[in-house]
Image (spheres, rainbow, N blue to C red):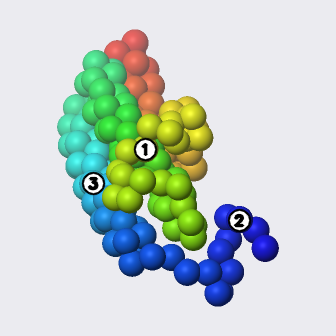
Amino acid sequence: MSSTNPGPNSQISDQQVKHLEFIQAVVTRLGNGSFLIKGWALTAAGIFFAVLSKNLSWKVALTGFVPIVGFWLLDSYYLRQERLFRKLYDAVRLPGSTVEPFFMGVNNYHSAVPWVDVITSHTMRNFYGTLALVNVVFLVGGVVQSRS
């Protein structure tokens, strides 16, 4: 049987169960934070897009990248933290785990969750990439308009 997949007869202690509950609470909070960040990013981008639809300006469109990139990086931080805590969860859930009881540090997993993998993940690229793409359309439109 695989050491990463405990069998049906394997037992974990009550202490491990409580530890897993603590970790899951952190993962849940991080997920909620990420959801809120996406909401704020969509709101900020929507405001820029509304302004640009009324008054096309390449300068405003260029400024519109600031919140998109800022929220992209902040959301990536939350997603990375969530993945790090999931790694900790995986280590704690094993019967006979060597993780210190109620230890909540994730430093040992940093190399397993590289920043670039998180920032360029499917979820991040689809959400923030779409916002950036719409902003690029406004930017190009603003440049074309200013030249004519």
Residue 19 vertical position relative to residue 109 in the rendered view, above or below: below
Q: Which mark is residue 121?
A: none
Mark 1 surroundings: few (<14), some (14-19) or many (≥20) residues within 10 A: some
- Residue 68: give x, y in percent of width and height: 34, 35
| Res 28 → quadrant | bottom left
* Rendered-image quadrant of the C terminus: top left
Q: Which residue is mark 1?
A: 106
- Residue 115: give x, y in percent of width and height: 51, 33
Looking at the image, which is closer to me, 79 or 64? 79
Q: Which residue is mark 2?
A: 3
**Is residue 140 visible to the viewer in this orientation of the structure?**
yes
Q: Which residue is mark 3?
A: 33
Q: Earlier in the sequence, mark 1 or mark 3?
A: 3
| Res 8 → quadrant | bottom right
- Residue 14: give x, y in percent of width and height: 39, 78
Residue located 37% across and 71% down the image: 15
Mark 3 surroundings: few (<14), some (14-19) or many (≥20) residues within 10 A: some
Per the image, label 3 sits on a secondary structure element best described as helix
Q: For the residue marked with disc 1, what is the amino acid? A: Val
Residue 71 vertical position relative to residue 59 in the rendered view, above or below: below
Q: For the residue marked with disc 2, what is the amino acid? A: Ser
Q: Nearer the viewer, mark 1 or mark 3?
A: 1
Q: For the residue marked with disc 3, what is the amino acid? A: Gly
Residue located 40% across and 12% down the image: 147
Residue 48 vertical position relative to residue 42 in the rendered view, above or below: above
